[in-house]
Image (tube, coloured by chain):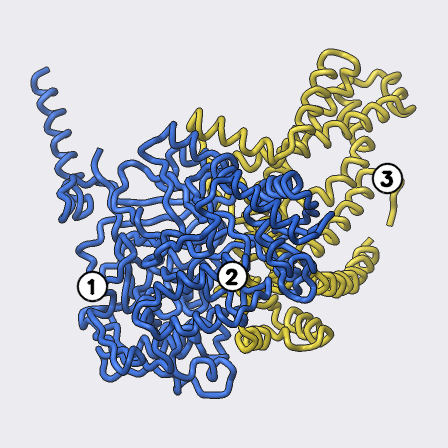
Chain colours: A blue, B yellow
Amino acid sequence: MQASKLRTMFIAMTAVILAASFTQAWSAESHPVTGEALSDNQTFTYRLLDQFPTLDPQLNQDVSGFHVIRDLFEGLLSQDAEGNLVPGVATHFTASDNNTTYTFALRPDARWSNGDPVTAHDFVYAWRRAVDPVTASPYGWYLELTQIVNAADILAGEKDPAELGVNAVDDHTLEVRLFAPLPYFPAMTTYATLFPAHRATIEAHGATWTAPGNMVSNGAYVLSELVLNEYHRRVKNPEYWAADNVIIEEVTGLVINDDNQALTRYRAGELDHLQPLPAGQYPALKEEMPDEATSVPRLCSYYYAINHSESGHPALKDVRVRRALSIAIDRNVIVERLLKGGQWPAYNFTHLKTAGFEMPEIAYASLDQTERDDEARRLMAASGIENLTLRLIYNTSESHKQIATVISQMWKQKLGVTTELANFEWKTYLNIMDNQEFDLARSGWCGDYNEASTFLDLLTTTHGANRGKYSNPDVDELMNASKTVEDPGAIYAEVEQILAEDMAIIPIYHYANTFLLSSDIRGWPYDNVENNWYSKNLYRVAD
Amino acid sequence: MIYYVARRLAVAVPTLLILIIVSYVLMYAAPGGPFDTERTLPPEVMANLQHKYGLDQPLVVQIWRYVVSIVTEFDFGPSFQYTDQTVNDIIRQGFPVTLTYGAWSFLVAVLAGVSLGIAAAVCHNTFLDYLCVGVSVGAQVLPNFVLAPVLTLVFTLWLAWLPGGGWQGGHWPYVVLPVIALSTSFMASIARMTRSSMLEALNADFIRTARAKGLPMRRIVIRHALKPAMLPVISYLGPTFVGMITGSVVIDVFFATGGIGQFFVNSALNRDYPVIMGITILAGALTIAFNLVVDLLYAWLDPRIRY
């Protein structure tokens, strides 16, 4: 008896010792900064709403692809949990010539996943590739936006890609020349288009260079598996310069299209992270799983575009009508009764949590709804317009439909305005909006970077997404001026006032992101309004 | 018979060509294009994209180039949406998935459906008949988009027996739920069809003769009644089989299988022209092939039919 008990104990102990020696380096260790005990299981599984179209940094134009690309690749600069700039491949940079020349110093220990050093030439190659007409990147315009010398001419085929205003002074020094000053240029290098690319790999494999096994990348992870519309997996890159600080060993993204199905699978323990939650379910889930359900700001604004062009309804040319329509909307009803996910009622365009943005005092925001309704009726009566019928279009979605229905009810009851609702699938919808065949159109805009101009530029005359064709020389001039001043905050406030006065668009709400995250996963960047998470900052604590 | 098959195959070529042309033109007629996004692209960027994919050519030239590259290189072009993939890659990845769960579903639907139908017909107006009819009507009114979430709820969340989705190369636990969800309503249709045509066959003169001769019931049903009773079922099964193996968007979406059913619908929404065309041609070619198979089966089942 005794002997067999001893033997059992011995076997058990051997098993424990063996198991311990085979598990990852991090097991039974604690987090280097916080000291929390770490779990043996350092894997992270999350849900993707849709398959990302591409993992090619220069071709990417999509949020769903970008979150994978920023794990696989690293740009000059990166973001911390609050969204502040932190060193990436570059350790530091200097700006000169009134913010038109930027010089980045690259760390000598940065390496590609095949062991090659990451040099300034890799950035030059990638950026030229992004604007080369042969590449035909749908995000080529991003380099125009950065104001890099010659980007626009190269895209138009008028200059050679070699003439792009970026050059490698030596292997570890990158110099960028802009044709106009751009104080937030460094922040723009955190986006995929400006990530480096490994020339030899792309030249060897062509369009399939991003396939697992082919891809050479320089981020904290490398792509190990990819099955379209099913899943992909990325594993820790041992060549990454800060690999010692990377705790999560393996990240798996499962494509689950249906929100409710995804929720069932989260409940079944198949997922550590789920986003977005099924519409309207956030309060119930928060009650049920208070440690796991969260709502954080998301840098997007929901609004109705007003058609200011020739084809728009004549009544909408009257600012009193536009203002009456906007202020008659009880945004609290939409946010609290319909969406229920921590969104904010919006009375301006720029998302309220945008970095450095100070919310100006918008007059109608400070009234209560009864006062607004009275004002709306007064304005409508003053305009002398009666029996107004407007055409409101939205892209097919249950949530857009609910909001449109509620708003049309409010307009009917308060102003006697009739609204014809029409919905279209996405591409048809874009086509209709591009042709200005609407009076009012549901729209949303997400910031490309965390700065107010990403919103306000949209309402300048020539912007590609200004589908209501709003045009105000004052706004154009102010936004132009904002590019060169040290602190554009006052200009943004003034533009918001003009937009509110003019009611250029009808703001409705500022987005929030609702998600579920396993309670043992730590390091989530709750305070990053762009919701840019990097797997290298996550870790799983022991139970 | 060989002459008949050869003639049918010869007709298939122009049929496919017409399919390609009509689909291409219809696709073009849909508003919006593959590169339309929320942010209107600057004209120079759009021009580069159009040029890269040959969309700056006249429609006739595009169709001609498309057909030529299929015929000469069996190349169905790159995907506009998944820019790192070609249409061949997508079909190579997605078709085996739908083929697997589709073929299993077909097998399950046919075996269960035909058995239920025969049982109901043989035991006409008995409890067993009512049970079979009840089951098949119940299965018929349970569409797969209702069944799929219920199955996941029961087998994944409550019982924790099977994964709630994924494919993992067709490992069996991942195949079970898609097969149940897809086969159920087809099984019901097959059962009802088998029952009614079996009832008809059992009342036919030659069956009465067989009974009068004193043949055992099992032999009458299997040897004599089943073959003629299957004729209407078989003509239903041809296109059904093609529909099942080319995938169901509901199954692909709910169980995240990565099958081509979802690619087909997404490509239409994204205006991913080459993927729409590739899958349309695949489904078209399979339909033509299986209609031929059905016609050949007819001749085998019914000696009165000759080609």
Q: How many marks?
A: 3
Q: Position of residue B211 (x, y in %)?
A: 85, 18
Category of crowding for the residue at label 1, using alpha-carbon neighbours closer than 10 angstroms: few (below 14), some (14–19), many (at least 20): some
The residue lying toward the viewer, choosing from A62 and A453, is A453
Q: Nearer the viewer, mark 1 or mark 3?
A: 1
C-alpha separation, residue under disc 2 versus residue under disc 1: 31 Å
In front of the other: B104 or A341: A341
Name the residue at 36% across, 83% down: A165
- Report the chain holding disc 2: B
Picture layout, residue A491 above or below residue B198? below
Mark 2 residue crowding within 10 angstroms, few (<14) / some (14–19) / many (20+): some
- Secondary structure state at the residue bearing disc 2: loop
Residue A222 falls in image quadrant: bottom left
Q: Residue at 28% x, 41% y: name it.
A: A521
Name the chain under label 3. Answer: B
Front one among B67 and A166: A166
Answer yes or no: are tags 1 and 3 on the same subunit. Answer: no
B215 to the left or right of A238: right
Res A204 visible:
no
Circle 1: residue type:
Trp
**Mark 3 or 2: the one toward you:** 2
Q: Mark 3 falls on what kind of element? A: loop
Label drawn at residue B303: 3
Apparent side of residue B284 relative to residue A179 in the rendered image (left or right): right
Question: Does the CB distance between marks 1 and 3 fall below 8 Å?
Answer: no
For the residue marked with disc 3, what is the amino acid? Pro
What residue would you read off at disc 1?
A: A241
Location of residue A467 by image quarter: bottom right
Measuring from the top left, give residue A309's x and y in whole percent: 65, 66
Q: Is residue A523 left or right of residue A506?
A: left
Q: Which residue is mark 2?
A: B82
Q: Earlier in the sequence, mark 3 or mark 2?
A: 2
